Image (cartoon, rainbow, N blue to C red):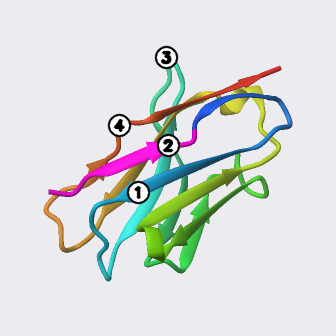
């Protein structure tokens, strides 16, 4: 059973920074870890992904501000968020998918609130 735990959310002023972490109980040789977010009343949207620890992809809205990276020693993927805007306010979720798994796994989410 794969478990993902997010941490690092909180309240920050516009222009500030936060670092989110997603720790997995399992690491696979082929896997993608993604971050999504969901604001109140809106659909969940893609934020960033890290494929096999090498290839990154970002939503246009966060390019140049957010960075996704992996800490192999800690089975953790981090999302460094800089120059935060009120529009970044949402619950952030990480997701793991791998061809070795029969389904995608999601974390419980962590709240990020950016005040203006």
Q: State which mark lies toward you, 3 or 4.
A: 4
| Residue 61 colored in magenta in the image | no
Occupied quadrant, residue 28? bottom left
In contact (CB < 8 Å): disc 1 and disc 2: yes
Q: State which mark lies toward you, 2 or 3.
A: 2
Label placed on residue 108? 4
Magenta region: which residues? 1-8
Q: Earlier in the sequence, mark 1 or mark 2?
A: 2
Q: How far apart are marks 2 and 3 (CA)?
A: 23 Å
Secondary element type, mark 4 = loop
Q: Which of marks 2 and 3 is nearer the N terminus?
A: 2
Residue 76's spot in the image, x, y percent?
Answer: 46, 63
Secondary element type, mark 3 = loop
Residue sitting at x 70%, y 46%: 61
101 shown above or below 29: above
Local crowd at mark 3 within 10 Å, few (<14), some, or many (≥20)? few
Q: Earlier in the sequence, mark 3 or mark 4?
A: 3
Residue where numbered disc 1 is placed: 23
In contact (CB < 8 Å): disc 4 and disc 2: no
Residue sitting at x 76%, y 43%: 17
Residue 72's spot in the image, x, y percent?
Answer: 47, 76
Secondary element type, mark 2 = strand
Residue where numbered disc 3 is placed: 41
Q: State which mark lies toward you, 4 or 2.
A: 2
């Amino acid at each position: 059973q794969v478990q993902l735990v997010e941490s690092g959310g909180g309240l920050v002023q516009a222009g500030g920074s936060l670092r989110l972490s997603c720790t997995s109980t399992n690491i696979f040789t082929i896997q993608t870890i993604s971050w999504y977010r969901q604001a109140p009343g809106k659909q969940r949207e893609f934020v960033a992904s890290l494929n096999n620890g090498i290839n990154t992809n970002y939503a246009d809205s966060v390019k140049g501000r957010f960075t996704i990276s992996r800490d192999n020693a800690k089975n953790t993927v981090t999302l460094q968020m800089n120059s935060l805007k009120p529009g970044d306010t949402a619950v952030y979720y990480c997701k793991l998918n791998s061809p070795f798994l029969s389904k995608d796994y999601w974390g419980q989410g962590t709240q990020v609130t950016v005040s203006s």
